Image: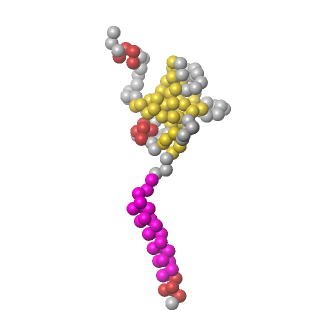
């Protein structure tokens, strides 16, 4: 028996390869509070999530994905805690790459991701400090010249 028969279903109509993202996300269902989930893989047309609650096929949800935002989706299948989701509209071009490369790290002790602030080099910080100080002295010099 061919091993590919176990990996892909016959009715799989995916036009793009799945990209493993392995990120924490957020499940949003109507009037319920957001729940942390695991986003296992992603395409422009859908994703596979590991959710803490069983969701029936046909359920409409919102999936919060770092680097993309909240996306409206429909549950298409469920196998235990794993769920296949089809987005109501395809993601914009480059969105999958943004999700993979987004600068988000889990906060210790939390399932919610926290965006990491970009770091500046010492040289860039020094240049900004010099520019701010020089502009202040420029204002002082202009005022003295106008008075004198």
The single residue placed furthest to the front in the displayed view is: 109
Residue occupying the point 64% across, 34% down:
33
Answer left or right for 59 relative to 136: right
Q: How is the image coloured?
A: secondary structure
Residue 110 x/y as whole percent: 57, 37
Residue 66 in magenta stretch: no
Q: Is residue 136 above or below residue 107?
A: below
Residue occupying the point 48% across, 82% down:
141
Residue occupying the point 49% across, 31% down:
39
The single residue placed furthest to the left in the displayed view is: 2
The single residue placed furthest to the top in the displayed view is: 1
Secondary structure mostly seen in magenta is: helix
Of 12 and 3, the residue lying toward us: 3
Residue 87 x/y as whole percent: 50, 30
Of 143 and 129, the residue lying toward us: 129
Residue 41 x/y as whole percent: 44, 29
Answer left or right for 93 relative to 108: left
| Residue range highlighted in magenta | 119-142
The N terminus appears in which quarter of the rendering?
A: top left
Answer left or right for 2 relative to 61: left
Residue 138 in magenta stretch: yes
Residue 6 x/y as whole percent: 39, 15
Of 10 and 21, the residue lying toward us: 21
The single residue placed furthest to the right in the displayed view is: 31
Residue occupying the point 48% across, 34% down:
23
């Amino acid at each position: 028996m061919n091993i590919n028969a176990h990996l892909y279903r016959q009715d799989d109509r995916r036009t793009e390869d799945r990209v493993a993202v392995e990120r924490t996300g957020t499940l949003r269902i109507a009037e319920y509070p957001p729940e942390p989930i695991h986003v296992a893989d992603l395409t422009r047309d859908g994703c596979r999530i590991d959710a803490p609650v069983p969701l029936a096929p046909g359920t409409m949800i919102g999936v919060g994905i770092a680097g993309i935002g909240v996306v409206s989706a429909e549950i298409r299948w469920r196998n235990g805690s794993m769920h296949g989701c089809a987005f109501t509209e395809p993601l914009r071009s480059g969105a999958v790459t943004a999700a993979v490369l987004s600068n988000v790290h889990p906060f210790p002790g939390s399932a919610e991701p926290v965006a990491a602030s970009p770091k500046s080099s010492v040289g860039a910080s020094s240049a900004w400090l010099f520019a701010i100080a020089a502009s202040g002295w420029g204002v002082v010099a202009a005022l003295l010249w106008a008075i004198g």
